Amino acid sequence: MINTSETLAVQTIENFLTADETAQVTKIVDDQLAATGWVPARPSEGLTPPDAAQEILSGAIGRAMPVIRRAFPSAAFVAPWLYHDLKPGDEIRSHVHGMGDPDERPVRLARVVFNLQDAGSGGEFYLDTSACDELWTGRVAEADGVFAPGTRFVHEITARSGPVALDAIAATRWICRPPAGTTLVYGAQLIHGVTPVIAGRARKLITDLCAGPGTRPEAPQPHSRALHAPH
């Protein structure tokens, strides 16, 4: 059963992709960008990489799943990956996805982010932790579902909606600077964002880590917007 701790957990997987695999995925995405001319209309817009890239990433997830399940024992599979490309001036403001509708299946347990290319300056992923009571709804899981009895649920909060302004609450910020080849998995009930890109490009691959029962979601169509806000 899924408990609150899983939805607030953090796990890194060093050497998630080898240098050769990272280069292969980068070339596949670069070729896709050259062929399509895709440019994101906003920092939150994502592009679905081709199957060849998805296969490399799926293989890496398969290798990493034993480590992922140390922190996320309910993890079953990931959704198709999305590519995000942030240029100077772009940022992802603080937000929290939450669990969506806790009765929907499969459950989005966490998010997975891989830095395909770090910005020259800025563009750093962060997590905010806070004891703010207003983050949480009054809903508590009962004994007849996939969530452990007593599991709590945060509100879904963006920069423009939600019961509290995330930039105004007392919180502790944790800046993430993973080494090359590392992926980060973080619970769906954690506040997070990306600092403004100052120089260069921040290129990221992102997906949902899902818990069953349920089936793997279909990939969005190319040039589609992300199903959820990035990260």
Image (cartoon, rainbow, N blue to C red):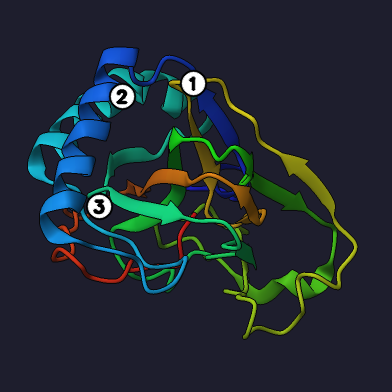
Amino acid type indicated by mark 2: Thr
Q: Nearer the viewer, residue 24 or 206?
A: 24
Circle 3 crowding by C-alpha within 10 Å: few under 14, some 14–19, many from 20: few
Amino acid type indicated by mark 3: Pro
Q: Nearer the viewer, residue 177 or 97?
A: 177
The residue carrying mark 3 is: 213
Residue positioned 47% across, 65% down in the render: 43
Query: Residue 73, position in %: x, y?
Result: 44, 33
Q: Are marks 2 and 1 in contact (CB under 8 Å)?
A: yes
Distance Cα–Cα, label 2 vs label 1: 9 Å
Q: How many marks?
A: 3
Q: Are marks 3 and 1 in contact (CB under 8 Å)?
A: no
- Which quadrant of the figure contains the N terminus? top left
Amino acid type indicated by mark 1: Ala
- Taking 153 as reference, is 126 above or below it? above
The residue carrying mark 1 is: 180
Pick whichever of labels 2 and 3 is earlier in the sequence.
2
